[in-house]
Protein backbone atom coordinates (compact mmCIF):
# COMPACT_ATOMS: atom_id res chain seq x y z
CA UNK A 1 0.00 0.00 0.00
CA UNK A 2 1.59 3.29 -1.11
CA UNK A 3 2.22 5.75 1.75
CA UNK A 4 0.31 8.97 1.07
CA UNK A 5 2.20 12.10 2.13
CA UNK A 6 0.34 15.33 2.92
CA UNK A 7 1.97 18.74 2.60
CA UNK A 8 -0.60 21.26 3.91
CA UNK A 9 -0.29 24.74 2.41
CA UNK A 10 -0.03 27.49 5.02
CA UNK A 11 -1.55 29.90 2.50
CA UNK A 12 -4.91 28.97 4.04
CA UNK A 13 -3.63 29.32 7.62
CA UNK A 14 -4.21 32.24 10.01
CA UNK A 15 -1.29 34.49 9.04
CA UNK A 16 -1.45 36.25 12.40
CA UNK A 17 -0.31 33.04 14.12
CA UNK A 18 1.60 30.99 11.56
CA UNK A 19 3.88 29.40 14.16
CA UNK A 20 0.97 28.01 16.14
CA UNK A 21 -0.74 26.88 12.93
CA UNK A 22 2.40 25.00 11.87
CA UNK A 23 2.48 23.26 15.27
CA UNK A 24 -1.17 22.22 14.74
CA UNK A 25 -0.27 20.79 11.32
CA UNK A 26 2.57 18.77 12.82
CA UNK A 27 0.34 17.48 15.61
CA UNK A 28 -2.35 16.75 13.01
CA UNK A 29 -0.06 14.35 11.13
CA UNK A 30 1.30 16.52 8.30
CA UNK A 31 4.39 15.06 6.59
CA UNK A 32 5.72 18.32 5.16
CA UNK A 33 4.78 22.01 5.40
CA UNK A 34 3.99 23.61 2.03
CA UNK A 35 5.09 27.25 2.11
CA UNK A 36 3.65 29.28 -0.76
CA UNK A 37 5.93 32.22 -1.53
CA UNK A 38 4.37 34.77 -3.89
CA UNK A 39 5.88 38.03 -5.14
CA UNK A 40 2.91 39.84 -6.74
CA UNK A 41 4.80 39.66 -10.04
CA UNK A 42 5.07 36.03 -11.13
CA UNK A 43 1.60 35.56 -9.61
CA UNK A 44 -0.96 38.26 -8.74
CA UNK A 45 -0.62 37.79 -4.98
CA UNK A 46 1.94 38.55 -2.27
CA UNK A 47 2.66 36.38 0.78
CA UNK A 48 5.82 35.85 2.81
CA UNK A 49 9.59 35.86 2.32
CA UNK A 50 12.82 34.63 3.92
CA UNK A 51 12.57 36.53 7.27
CA UNK A 52 9.19 34.94 8.04
CA UNK A 53 10.37 31.47 7.02
CA UNK A 54 13.47 31.92 9.19
CA UNK A 55 11.24 32.69 12.19
CA UNK A 56 8.91 29.78 11.47
CA UNK A 57 11.80 27.30 11.31
CA UNK A 58 11.89 26.81 15.10
CA UNK A 59 8.24 25.69 15.26
CA UNK A 60 8.71 22.31 13.59
CA UNK A 61 11.24 19.77 12.44
CA UNK A 62 8.98 18.86 9.48
CA UNK A 63 10.48 19.59 6.05
CA UNK A 64 9.67 23.04 4.65
CA UNK A 65 8.38 22.36 1.14
CA UNK A 66 8.94 25.87 -0.21
CA UNK A 67 7.07 26.71 -3.41
CA UNK A 68 8.66 29.80 -4.99
CA UNK A 69 6.16 31.58 -7.18
CA UNK A 70 8.60 34.42 -7.73
CA UNK A 71 10.45 35.76 -10.75
CA UNK A 72 13.31 36.17 -11.31
CA UNK A 73 14.01 33.33 -8.89
CA UNK A 74 17.75 32.48 -9.34
CA UNK A 75 19.16 35.34 -7.29
CA UNK A 76 16.86 34.58 -4.33
CA UNK A 77 17.55 30.83 -3.99
CA UNK A 78 20.33 31.38 -1.45
CA UNK A 79 18.01 33.44 0.79
CA UNK A 80 15.46 30.62 0.99
CA UNK A 81 18.15 28.01 1.53
CA UNK A 82 19.56 30.09 4.42
CA UNK A 83 16.05 30.69 5.83
CA UNK A 84 15.54 26.96 6.35
CA UNK A 85 13.83 25.57 3.24
CA UNK A 86 14.33 21.82 2.78
CA UNK A 87 12.79 21.53 -0.68
CA UNK A 88 13.06 24.55 -2.99
CA UNK A 89 10.59 24.40 -5.85
CA UNK A 90 10.89 26.80 -8.75
CA UNK A 91 8.94 27.44 -11.95
CA UNK A 92 10.91 27.00 -15.23
CA UNK A 93 9.43 30.25 -16.54
CA UNK A 94 11.02 32.15 -13.62
CA UNK A 95 14.67 31.42 -14.47
CA UNK A 96 16.84 32.12 -17.53
CA UNK A 97 18.66 28.83 -17.01
CA UNK A 98 16.84 25.95 -15.30
CA UNK A 99 20.00 23.82 -15.14
CA UNK A 100 21.96 26.56 -13.33
CA UNK A 101 19.12 27.21 -10.87
CA UNK A 102 18.81 23.49 -10.14
CA UNK A 103 22.57 23.29 -9.55
CA UNK A 104 22.40 26.28 -7.20
CA UNK A 105 19.66 24.64 -5.10
CA UNK A 106 21.78 21.47 -4.93
CA UNK A 107 24.86 23.51 -4.00
CA UNK A 108 23.04 24.51 -0.79
CA UNK A 109 22.22 20.87 -0.10
CA UNK A 110 18.50 21.34 -0.64
CA UNK A 111 16.08 19.09 -2.54
CA UNK A 112 15.16 20.36 -5.99
CA UNK A 113 11.53 20.88 -6.99
CA UNK A 114 10.31 22.05 -10.39
CA UNK A 115 6.69 23.14 -10.79
CA UNK A 116 4.57 22.78 -13.92
CA UNK A 117 1.65 25.16 -14.31
CA UNK A 118 -1.44 23.62 -15.92
CA UNK A 119 -0.39 24.94 -19.33
CA UNK A 120 3.33 24.11 -18.93
CA UNK A 121 4.38 20.89 -20.63
CA UNK A 122 6.59 18.20 -19.14
CA UNK A 123 9.15 18.79 -21.93
CA UNK A 124 10.22 22.05 -20.23
CA UNK A 125 11.94 20.02 -17.51
CA UNK A 126 12.67 16.68 -19.20
CA UNK A 127 16.37 17.43 -19.87
CA UNK A 128 16.91 17.96 -16.14
CA UNK A 129 14.67 15.16 -14.90
CA UNK A 130 17.47 13.13 -13.31
CA UNK A 131 18.52 16.14 -11.23
CA UNK A 132 15.01 16.79 -9.91
CA UNK A 133 13.78 15.39 -6.57
CA UNK A 134 10.19 16.59 -6.85
CA UNK A 135 7.88 17.58 -9.71
CA UNK A 136 5.12 19.88 -8.47
CA UNK A 137 2.12 19.54 -10.78
CA UNK A 138 -0.14 22.59 -10.46
CA UNK A 139 -3.80 21.66 -10.67
CA UNK A 140 -4.80 25.32 -10.49
CA UNK A 141 -3.24 28.45 -11.95
CA UNK A 142 -0.94 29.60 -9.13
CA UNK A 143 -1.70 32.59 -6.94
CA UNK A 144 -4.59 31.74 -4.67
CA UNK A 145 -5.95 29.01 -2.42
CA UNK A 146 -9.54 27.82 -2.67
CA UNK A 147 -9.60 27.42 -6.46
CA UNK A 148 -11.27 24.54 -8.34
CA UNK A 149 -9.17 21.50 -9.27
CA UNK A 150 -8.44 21.30 -13.02
CA UNK A 151 -9.08 17.63 -14.03
CA UNK A 152 -7.14 18.00 -17.28
CA UNK A 153 -3.91 17.75 -15.26
CA UNK A 154 -4.67 14.09 -14.44
CA UNK A 155 -3.24 13.09 -17.84
CA UNK A 156 -0.06 15.03 -17.08
CA UNK A 157 0.31 13.21 -13.76
CA UNK A 158 -0.17 9.83 -15.51
CA UNK A 159 2.45 10.79 -18.13
CA UNK A 160 4.91 11.83 -15.43
CA UNK A 161 4.33 8.56 -13.59
CA UNK A 162 5.10 6.64 -16.80
CA UNK A 163 8.34 8.62 -17.31
CA UNK A 164 9.27 7.97 -13.69
CA UNK A 165 8.63 4.23 -13.88
CA UNK A 166 10.18 3.69 -17.34
CA UNK A 167 13.27 5.72 -16.48
CA UNK A 168 13.51 4.29 -12.97
CA UNK A 169 13.75 7.88 -11.66
CA UNK A 170 13.00 8.52 -8.02
CA UNK A 171 11.49 12.01 -8.13
CA UNK A 172 8.30 12.50 -6.12
CA UNK A 173 5.15 13.66 -7.87
CA UNK A 174 3.40 16.33 -5.80
CA UNK A 175 0.03 17.83 -6.83
CA UNK A 176 -1.01 21.29 -5.75
CA UNK A 177 -4.31 23.10 -6.01
CA UNK A 178 -7.95 22.33 -5.31
CA UNK A 179 -7.26 18.93 -3.73
CA UNK A 180 -10.28 17.73 -1.74
CA UNK A 181 -11.95 14.57 -0.43
CA UNK A 182 -13.71 13.88 -3.73
CA UNK A 183 -10.76 14.22 -6.14
CA UNK A 184 -7.76 13.07 -4.03
CA UNK A 185 -8.27 9.35 -4.80
CA UNK A 186 -8.17 10.00 -8.57
CA UNK A 187 -5.04 12.14 -8.13
CA UNK A 188 -3.32 9.38 -6.15
CA UNK A 189 -4.39 6.70 -8.64
CA UNK A 190 -2.93 8.84 -11.44
CA UNK A 191 0.45 8.59 -9.69
CA UNK A 192 0.77 11.36 -7.11
CA UNK A 193 3.03 10.68 -4.09
CA UNK A 194 2.38 13.91 -2.16
CA UNK A 195 -0.81 16.00 -1.94
CA UNK A 196 -0.72 19.71 -1.20
CA UNK A 197 -3.85 21.03 0.41
CA UNK A 198 -4.75 24.34 1.99
CA UNK A 199 -8.49 24.85 2.00
CA UNK A 200 -9.46 21.22 2.63
CA UNK A 201 -7.05 20.80 5.54
CA UNK A 202 -7.84 24.12 7.24
CA UNK A 203 -11.53 24.58 6.46
CA UNK A 204 -13.31 21.19 6.24
CA UNK A 205 -14.91 19.51 9.31
CA UNK A 206 -15.01 22.83 11.21
CA UNK A 207 -11.29 23.23 10.70
CA UNK A 208 -10.34 19.95 12.40
CA UNK A 209 -6.86 19.63 10.91
CA UNK A 210 -6.16 16.14 12.26
CA UNK A 211 -9.45 14.76 10.89
CA UNK A 212 -8.85 16.34 7.50
CA UNK A 213 -5.27 15.12 7.15
CA UNK A 214 -6.25 11.61 8.26
CA UNK A 215 -9.16 11.60 5.79
CA UNK A 216 -6.86 12.63 2.90
CA UNK A 217 -4.42 9.89 3.94
CA UNK A 218 -7.17 7.27 4.02
CA UNK A 219 -8.11 7.76 0.37
C1 LIG B 1 -1.62 28.21 -5.21
C2 LIG B 1 -0.74 27.47 -4.22
C3 LIG B 1 -1.37 26.23 -3.66
C4 LIG B 1 -2.66 26.54 -2.96
C5 LIG B 1 -3.32 25.27 -2.50
O1 LIG B 1 -0.83 29.09 -5.96
O2 LIG B 1 0.46 27.06 -4.86
O3 LIG B 1 -0.46 25.61 -2.76
O4 LIG B 1 -2.39 27.35 -1.87
O5 LIG B 1 -4.44 25.69 -1.79
P1 LIG B 1 -5.85 24.96 -1.99
O6 LIG B 1 -5.63 23.57 -1.43
O7 LIG B 1 -6.77 25.80 -1.17
O8 LIG B 1 -6.14 24.96 -3.44
ZN1 LIG C 1 1.88 25.78 -3.67
Image (spheres, helix red, strand yellow):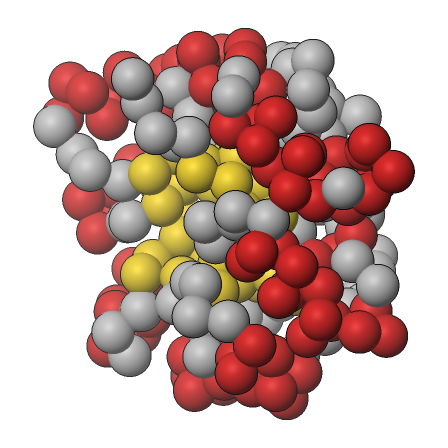
Report whether 105 appears left or right of 21: left
Locate residue 142, reporting x and y percent.
71, 45
Q: Is residue 146 visible?
A: no
- Which residue is painted at 58% across and 70% down in the image? 72
The quarter of the picture where residue 5 lies is top left
Locate residue 188, reporting x and y percent.
46, 19
Which quadrant would the N terminus be assigned to in this image?
Answer: top left
Q: Nearer the viewer, residue 173 or 60?
A: 60
The quarter of the picture where residue 85 lies is bottom left
Locate residue 22, reporting x and y percent.
64, 65
Locate residue 91, reporting x and y percent.
52, 53
Q: Is residue 159 visible?
A: yes
- Which residue is painted at 27% across and 40% down in the image? 171
- Which residue is painted at 52% across and 83% down in the image? 58
Up-down relation of residue 216 to residue 65 (above or below): above
Q: Nearer the viewer, residue 160 or 56?
A: 56
Up-down relation of residue 163 to residue 13 (above or below): above
- Which residue is painted at 80% across and 25% down in the image? 148
Report whether 140 appears left or right of 2: right
Amino acid sequence: MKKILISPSILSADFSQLGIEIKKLEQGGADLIHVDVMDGHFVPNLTIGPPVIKNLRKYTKLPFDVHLMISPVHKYIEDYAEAGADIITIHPEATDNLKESINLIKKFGKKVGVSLNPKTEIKTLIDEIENINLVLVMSVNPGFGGQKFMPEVLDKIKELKKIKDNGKYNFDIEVDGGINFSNSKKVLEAGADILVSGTTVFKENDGNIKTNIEKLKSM
